[in-house]
Amino acid sequence: MGVSAVEDEDDPFEEQREKAENPMRRLFLQYGAEKKVAFVVGVFSSIVARALDLLPPILLGVAVDAIFEAQGAGDREYSLFLVPDAWIPATEQGQLYFTVGIIAFAFFGGAAFHYSRNWGWNAFSQHIQHQIRTDTYDKMQRLNMDFFADKQTGEMMSILSNDVNRLERFLNDGMNSAFRLGVMVVGIAIILLAVNWQLAMITLVIVPLIGVFTYYFIKTIQPKYADVRSSVGKVNSRLENNLGGIQVIKTSNTETFESDRVEDVSQGYFDANWDAISTRIKFFPGLRMLAGVGFVLTFFIGGLMVIGDGVGPFTSDLQAGEFVTFILLSQRFIWPMAQFGQIINMYQRAYASSARIFGLMDEPSRIVEDPDADELVVSDGEVVYDDVSFGYDDTETIVEDVSFEVDGGDTLALVGPTGAGKSTVLKLLLRMYDVDEGSITIDGKDLRDVTIPSLRRQVGYVSQDTFMFYGTVEENISYGTFNSDRESVVEAAKAAEAHEFITNLPEGYDTEVGERGVKLSGGQRQRISIARAILKDPEILILDEATSDVDTETEMLIQRSVDRLTADRTTFSIAHRLSTIKDADKIIVLEDGRIVERGSHDDLIAEDGLYAHLWGVQAGEIDELPDEFIERAQQRDANRIEAGE
Ligand code: ADP
């Protein structure tokens, strides 16, 4: 039985899953309702198609008895259920034509209903799959950033692809089969009972046996499949990890060690798989034996009845034709029974998948837009933080009582050790998170009173690690602006000092970049990002360590483009290299989420505190920070490790 062994081992969405109640019902009511017609067509056609499938074996039995037997015994009338006797031709020849006609109808009608059945189920399931995928993606994009920090991209992908596909498989194959099998089993049972209930009892006695057998089989194999999934997960992580670290493996000369480790996990997978396989391959032979017992008994007792040697309750008259019907139908009875196990399994998986999907959809958003929010109109670009405090969770305050003002067009630089909260302070300006206390205003307007799109349109963000979307250079520059023409893109690229290198790319602005395209260096990506910001022309700009990890020449180019970008714009800048922010109108120094120093470069140098010392080290004037700073840095570092970061 083809129970698939592929499912994710750990479930990082357990929390989401538990929140979703009755996911299958919701799936049908919320998404299925739009495709009621397709659903009804699918169900109806499934039933009719299967009923038509059952016609030929019945007719065969009836025809054998009526047409052929009648020549000898002459005591058997041609009659069919549901068909009035008046419709049945009187002559044997007529009856033959009639039978052939019905059989032909059963085949051709069957074909038509098979078609409409597949149309119905597919239309229904594809629609649901498509809607769910787009809705889930849409929802995912709007989730809080911390959701993405916690969950791996791979896990998100798994919901969007595996879970959605699994739902489709169940809706398409599982439900379709469930109806088909239901009709088969019930239909055949009714026919057998109608033809000869005594013999039917013999045929049907194996049904519960098959049910019990299948149930125990699934119970035995499921934990084995869980082992397979877990070991396949181990193999994948090991391979992924090793391929990622191939350089370290080579330079540490640990190829043999790593090969052994891979062999170990692969052996684990082999063993788990073999264990599952050795159980699985017993299923069909077992089923066959059970089916064989039923078949042999039916054949034996039915045969006795036909030749008139029956015993006990099995002495009723059984015609050869009826016997043929029995044999043909009982054959068709066994496999559907076995498939029910498979369907139950599919249902369980679909249930888990839809629970994960709806759990995700129900994930509350921390950022809620006020229904009465206005469009943000930036005139001066004055930004005020008033006593702002914030923590990602309830346990720790990351930003504490931060207050400052930046006049329109000015530049404010944030300085401080890693983890001091610089990025967090600026994420609050983009409203990636809401402040816990205090307020942030732009031109006197509280961020919580303006619409999020209007805010993000006017606050540009240039990060140190710019992501390139798969597409051309031009598309990457105009990303977010979209309606710009080539000319303005080139102009922006020139201002960002990117034009030169772009024209040197194989296809200039039409060169494909991103994961599958040409790889750009960090410095080149930064300039694309700056060009993007220049084109977007926001009133307020955030530069997050815009000049890290590049050589001095590139840094100079970037600095020049940044100067152009920041002129006349309110700018927030985070930089480790203090030389780049020396000319900022204001500098604030953060330590552990609090402002510890503020002022201009000259003020801070005069103050002789943390900034002055950092500056001294970077300018090469002093060799090392004073011990107290180093101790504090070590303490912070240790705390970070404790917090599991
Ligand atoms: P900086 O930009 O000064 O290096 P950050 O603002 O990035 O500092 O981080 C400040 C603190 O907040 C750090 O301790 C960091 O671990 C924590 N932090 C940052 N992002 C998150 C997040 N999404 N969830 C929880 N904690 C976070």
Image (cartoon, grey):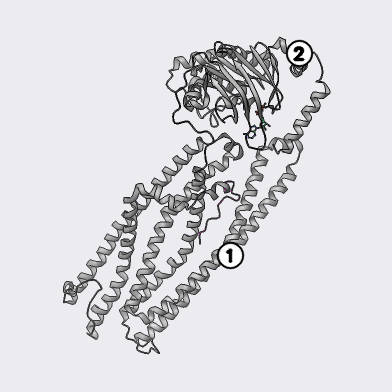
Residue type highlighted by circle 1 = Thr
> What's the magenta region?
1-13
Q: Judging from the image, what secondary structure is the residue with disc 1 in?
A: helix
Q: Closer to the camera, 12 or 586?
A: 586
* Residue occupied by mark 1: 220
Query: Which residue sits at x=33%, y=57%?
Result: 114
Q: Position of residue 591 (x, y in %)?
A: 71, 25
- Predominant secondary structure in magenta? loop
Q: Judging from the image, what secondary structure is the residue with disc 2 in?
A: helix
Query: Vertically, is 154 above or below 268?
Result: above
The quadrant holding residue 66 is bottom left
* Residue occupied by mark 2: 607
Image quarter where the C terminus lies is: top right
Mark 2 surroundings: few (<14), some (14-19) or many (≥20) residues within 10 A: some
Q: Position of residue 151 (x, y in %)?
A: 59, 40
Determine whether the beta carbon of the residue marked 1 sits less than 8 angstroms from the nearest atom of ligand 1.
no
The quadrant holding residue 221 is bottom right
Q: Does residue 624 show up?
A: yes
Q: Horizontally, is 255 left or right of 513 in the view?
A: right
Quarter containing ligand 1?
top right
